[in-house]
Amino acid sequence: MSQTHKNVTRRPLVAGNWKMYRTASDTRSLLEDIVKLVSKIATMDLVVCPPFTSLSVAAETLGRHGILALGAQNMHQNKEGAFTGEISGPMLREFGVRYVILGHSERRQYFNETDAQVAAKAQAAVGYHLRPIVCVGETLAQRDAGETTAVVTSQVRASLSGFPVDQLEELVLAYEPIWAIGTGKVATPQQANEVHLNIRKLLVKQFGSKGSDIRVIYGGSVKPDNAAELMAQPEIDGALVGGASLDAKGFFDIIESARSARASEND
Ligand code: PGA
């Protein structure tokens, strides 16, 4: 567990979380700009998660390229039903969506999502061949009170409760300290790696050796100028990028940092 090198069996993953930004008509040009830049990077999983209303145009734009996978930002756990305003897994699959962000702190904070809901959604997602990106992370008050490990441990355990062991290769975890999201305050690479290492230990405890293959990515103010240091950390397998993913060049630079961190491991 104390290795200083990355586990090269974990393929790096960089995902852009567009949040509630960009209309459908703005989506095409941003994606085309991103595709032009990333067209040579095939050694990583690259994902963009635009709003639901952009999925159709995004699928159409990306369909011709196949370099970037499409992700959604949330999903209801039921297949269908009287749930006004919600979107189901089969609805996402129809647009070729492959990933879904679940339990983002903004969903937990503003829409009262609980660990139990996140767990139900994660299980439902893999049932629909969607790869869940399950988010966890502590508030500043919790960090200051020395509760980071306890909070993250309890979120990981509860959000993954009942997750099918035969689907673990589909699972991605994102550690996103809430105090670093959208604030410009980034966790230091050491702070982030320390939490990632705890998450790794927890995953191995919960799922045995398969737990060491689950990707754990970092999110929270990842920018072109801090990505290289973060991505070089042994336990950081990629990034969940908010604000910086809305700028094609910025997103590309972050992807490049993750790629070179991996390339230097392979040297
Ligand atoms: P940020 O957002 O990069 O804008 O901090 C990250 C996220 O919320 O996923």
Image (tube, rainbow, N blue to C red):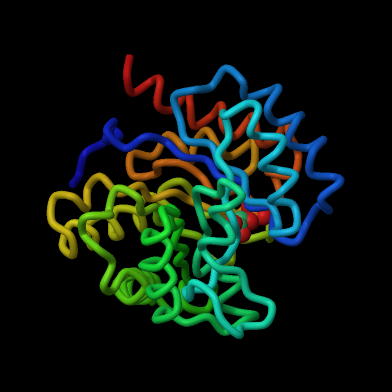
Name the quarter showing ligand 1: bottom right
Find residue 42 and report its horizontal and vertical position in percent. Answer: 49, 23
Q: How many marks?
A: 0
Can residue 227 be seen at all in this image of the molecule? yes
What's the residue at 47%, 77% (across, down)?
142
User: 111 left or right of 239?
Assistant: right
User: 84 left or right of 195?
Assistant: right
Specify the farthest residue to the right: 25
Above or below: residue 219 compared with residue 258: below
Q: Quadrant of residue 32?
A: top right
Q: Quadrant of residue 174?
A: bottom left
**Front in this rendered view, residue 103 or 226:** 103
Above or below: residue 150 compared with residue 94: below
User: 94 left or right of 218?
Assistant: right
What's the residue at 75%, 44% (across, down)?
57
What's the residue at 42%, 34% (across, down)?
232
**Front in this rendered view, residue 35 or 212:** 35
Find residue 180 and report its horizontal and vertical position in percent. Answer: 59, 60
What's the residue at 49%, 32% (across, down)?
258
Q: Quadrant of residue 116?
A: bottom left
Above or below: residue 62 compared with residue 87: above
Find residue 191 and report its horizontal and vertical position in percent. Answer: 42, 54
Specify the farthest residue to the left: 208
Above or below: residue 75 compared with residue 254: below
**Front in this rendered view, residue 233 or 144:** 233
Can residue 185 be seen at all in this image of the molecule? no
In which quadrant of the rendered image does the C terminus lie? Answer: top left
Find residue 245 and report its horizontal and vertical position in percent. Answer: 68, 43
